C-alpha cells in the first residue's frame, strides 16, 4: 500500500519551507519508508529516507520514476532503507558540507 504526503501534511519552517515528516505514519516503521521528492529539503527530518528526483512539470516524456525501478527493487530487499540510501546516495554529506569544496572533499573520502 502506498501513502502520499501533501503540503497539508508538512511542517512549515520559520523560513516558510514545507518539510515532510515521515513520523506522521505512526503505524509504519521508518526503516521501511522512502520519500521521493524533487525538493531535497522536503525530507530534511529523515534525510536517509529521501530519494531526490528531477522535477516533473506536465512532461509526457518524463521517465524519472521508471529509471528508478532497479534502485527501488534493491531497496525492497533491504532490512533498512536508510542504510542503503546512506551508502549509495550519501545525502547526509550534502547537508553536512558548508561549501562546495567541502562537499567534494567529503564525497571523495
Image (cartoon, rainbow, N blue to C red):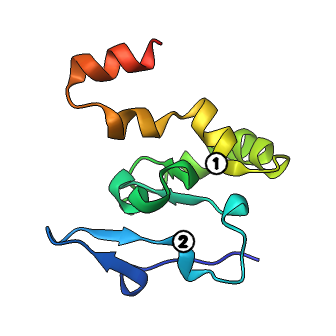
Instruction: Judge left or right: residue 40 versus residue 71.
Output: left
List the single residue furthest toward the right.
77
Residue 62 visible in this rendered orientation of the protein:
no
Label 2 packing within 10 angstroms: few (<14), some (14-19), many (20+): many
Label 1 packing within 10 angstroms: few (<14), some (14-19), many (20+): many
On screen, 18 above or below 89?
Answer: below
Q: How many marks?
A: 2
Q: Please report the residue visible at 61 percent of the width from the left and 41 percent of the height from the top.
A: 85
On screen, 1 above or below 64?
Answer: below
Q: Secondary structure at mark 1?
A: helix
Q: Please report the residue visible at 23 percent of the width from the left and 16 percent of the height from the top.
A: 101
On screen, 95 above or below 29?
Answer: above
Which mark sits nearer the N-terminus, 1 or 2?
2
Residue 74: x and y, percent?
A: 78, 41
Residue 42 visible in this rendered orientation of the protein:
yes
Instruction: Say which residue label 1 marks.
Output: 82
Q: Secondary structure at mark 2?
A: helix
Residue 13, quarter of picture: bottom left
Q: Please report the residue visible at 58 percent of the width from the left and 38 percent of the height from the top.
A: 86
Q: Which image quadrant: the N terminus?
A: bottom right
Instruction: Say which residue label 2 marks.
Output: 22
Instruction: Judge left or right: residue 80 versus residue 15.
Output: right
Instruction: Judge left or right: residue 102 versus residue 44.
Output: left
Residue 79: x and y, percent?
A: 82, 50
Q: Are marks 1 and 2 in contact (CB under 8 Å)?
A: no
On screen, 21 above or below 63?
Answer: below
Q: Nearer the viewer, residue 41 or 14?
A: 14
Q: CA distance from mark 1 to mark 2?
A: 13 Å
Residue 8: x and y, percent?
A: 38, 87
Amino acid at each position: 500500500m502506498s501513502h502520499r504526503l501533501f503540503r497539508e501534511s508538512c511542517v512549515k519552517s520559520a523560513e516558510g519551507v514545507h518539510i515532510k515528516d515521515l513520523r506522521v505514519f505512526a503505524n509504519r516503521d521508518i526503516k521501511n519508508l522512502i520519500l521521493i521528492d524533487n525538493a531535497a529539503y522536503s525530507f530534511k527530518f529523515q534525510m536517509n529516507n529521501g530519494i531526490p528526483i528531477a522535477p516533473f512539470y506536465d512532461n509526457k516524456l518524463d521517465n524519472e520514476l521508471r529509471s528508478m525501478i532497479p534502485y527501488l527493487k534493491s531497496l525492497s530487499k533491504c532490512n533498512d532503507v536508510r542504510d542503503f540510501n546512506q551508502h549509495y546516495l550519501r545525502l547526509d554529506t550534502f547537508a553536512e558540507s558548508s561549501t562546495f569544496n567541502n562537499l567534494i572533499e567529503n564525497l571523495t573520502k
